[in-house]
Image (spheres, grey):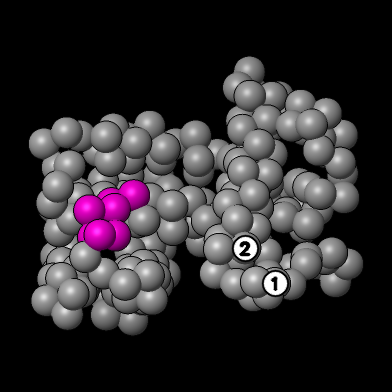
Amino acid sequence: MTSDDPVRRSGREAQRRRTRKAIVDAAIRLSADGATPSIDEIAAAGDVSRRTIYTYFPTLDHLLVDATLGAFNEPPIEEILDDPTLADDPVARVVALIQTMLKHSSHSLPLGRRLIRLTVDPPANNAHEPGVPRRSPRRVVWLERACEPLRGTLSEESFQRLISALTVVGGWEAQIALRDVRALDPQAEEEAITWAARVLVEAAIKEG
């Protein structure tokens, strides 16, 4: 088994997600009373080193924006993904996820634009390591959970291709393109993104 084996790669990615989540959760807890925690305080609360934090977040501002977005978006999205009435319908699950994300975009999109700027133009002393995403994998995790009913019918390659395609259409980048380039209003924006997500899932089901 090589270091590029899918099982090992998946294990590394899962560990990175857990580490990143521990850091973000620590920042959320420490920020709950309105105070701005330091990197040292977050490291202690998350049981990680300062260097580990900077591996995932080049600046404290980056980390705090990510934590704020997580605290804001996770509760309603977790509720949707745990809805038993959608358990076996991947199309309905993905559509519900996308619509829930868009519903809260009036608050999250400005922070999303800020986070994109922070990751597109990182500081010169950025210690970011190759293979570690610059942005939170939160969206990927949600999409994987929404598409979970397809794991038994799609190959792993097809499943991951679907998640990658949905990552493109189901996020702030798509909203920014539709608003800034297409000048769509929020309703037309939601219709376009929801349609694209539905078509991608239906195409994957058909191929499977």
Q: Is mark 2 on a helix, strand or loop?
A: helix
Q: Mark 2 points at which residue?
A: 8
**First reached walking from the N terminus: tag 2 or tag 1:** 1
Magenta region includes residue 173? no
In the rendered image, residue 146 lying in the magenta stretch gets the answer yes
- CB-based contact (under 8 Å), mark 2 and mark 1: yes
- Magenta region, residue range: 145-152
Other-residue count near label 1 (Cα within 10 Å), few / some / many at <14 / 14–19 / ≥20: few
Please, which residue is most extreme toward the top here?
33
Kind of residue sitting beneath label 2: Arg
Q: What residue type is labelled 1?
A: Ser
In the picture of the structure, the residue carrying the numbered disc 1 is 3
Main SS of the magenta part reads: helix
Say which element carries label 1: loop
Within-10-Å neighbours for mark 2: few <14, some 14–19, many 20+: few
Horizontal side of residue 1 vs 178, given as left or right: right
